[in-house]
Amino acid sequence: MTRVGPVTPKQKIELKFKIGRVFTPSAPIANESLFAGRKQQIARLINATSQRGQHAVLFGERGVGKTSLANVLSDFLTPLPGFIIVSTNCESTTNFKAIWTNVFNELIAVKTEIGMGFGPPIHTEESPLSQLLSGNPSPEEIRRLLQQLGKPSIVIIDELDRIKDEETIPRLADTIKTLSDHSTDSTLILVGVADSLDTLVKEHRSIDRALVQIQMPRMSPAELREIIDKGLKELGMTIDSRAAKRISNLSHGLPHYTHSLALHAAQSAVDRDSMAINQDDVVEAIKSAIENTQQSIKRNYHDATSSPRGNLYSEVLLSCALAETDELGYFPAVNIRAPMSKIMGKPYDVPAFSRHLNDFCEKDRGAVLQRSGYPKRYRFRFVNPLMEPFVVMKGISSGLISSDILDSEKPIIHPVSNETPPLFEQF
């Protein structure tokens, strides 16, 4: 086992601080050297930026790393000379003008004036391009200002789903259309969840040809392991294969939890004067991750599972978190049978937990699940994907399941079963 060696409390604190700079569950990755995976998505984004008139939408569940990819995109595009790259984040109060004010605040317009007489002095004046925006800018005005840059530009608009203003999405669609129609050498990259981007495309069916639609799925175990290995290499630390597999499996394809568990596991190792993470450190990391989870997730979990003994809400929610899902995170009720039976130690079928599933979709139970489809063919998924790993960690810490489940050769997330047995018809 690699030891830190004799260290002072100050040195240990400094090492823990460095660990916190490498593994960042609370913030997106901003450094390309620590970014892992997503090679296909990066290639498609680069292809979109290289083609005049093409734009891109990057979409996926919350927590899959869309913002991290948007943050490091400029690093990947560094070899391209002359590109201007600007990004802005949307908020609930953001409207069309606010987006472009933020963008053009980062772009400088240079005005040159030549004086009178022989050898006249040349005066230059620099000012943000946002000063040229009108009070109510139109998509055509945005196009003309982007053309004034005289250089190819990439504008990244992140967290599109936070926008509440009803006019903003249609006007962004109009902007894409006019930029594409005029073959303007500017590329918009819009980042958000699928629902917000569906709305964008519906506003202008004709922009479909101008949009490269890039889905960010959950990360594979290999990509999650890359996050762990890159971070530990930066720190000069190691991890045994079983501990790494447990972190990867528990993360449910969400890099947020890989960062969180790796952070706390690495700090646990340092606490025992070791530079090598083992399974005991992962157990400690689970406890710390639960304690540091967002309060909103803790509250929703409490609302979903609080009940008199024997009502099985905790067990059913845990089974939902362990159920086989499709690529969008949905599962039918039938896929809960296997994990529920394993947790309870005896066979359980759909009628035994159908009421619980419906309750989880209601506000009184925290509305932790959303339901799609129609009666007898409903499919469910977690409203907040970050709830799934939390539920599993709570199941392990409370003794409902053993941590040995994390040693499975397969990740917790599996392809959904196509089986639709007769009992499902009763639901």
Image (cartoon, rainbow, N blue to C red):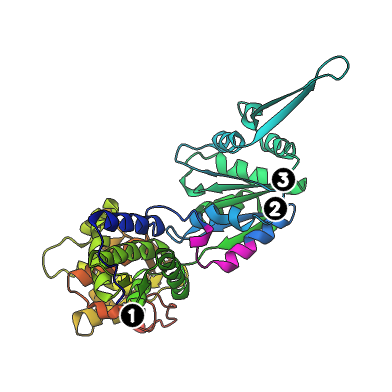
Which mark is drawn over residue 242? 1
Q: Is 145 above or below relative to 283?
A: above
Farthest residue, direction front: 6
Extreme left residue here? 309
Quarter of the rendering containing residue 242: bottom left
Label 2 crowd (10 A; few <14 / some 14-19 / many >=20): few
Image quadrant in which the C terminus is located: bottom left
Query: Which three-letter amino acid code belongs to the residue tagged 2?
Result: Ser
Residue 188 is left or right of residue 242, and the answer is right
* Disc 2 secondary structure class: helix
Quarter of the image for residue 212 reads bottom right
Circle 2 is placed at which residue position?
Answer: 206
Q: Nearer the viewer, mark 2 or mark 3?
A: 3
Which residue corresponds to mark 3? 179
Q: Decide whether residue 73 is among the magenta residues.
A: no
Q: Earlier in the sequence, mark 2 or mark 1?
A: 2
Q: Nearer the viewer, residue 77 or 387?
A: 77
- Residue 194 percent location from the top left of the image: 51, 57
Label number found at residue 228:
none
Q: Considering depth in this image, is 230 or 246 the residue closer to the camera?
A: 230
> What SS does tag 1 mark?
helix
Give the residue type that dot 3 points to.
Leu
Among the 4 quarters of the image, the one containing residue 310: bottom left
Which span is picked out in magenta?
32-44
User: As displayed, is residue 337 above or below residue 50?
Assistant: below
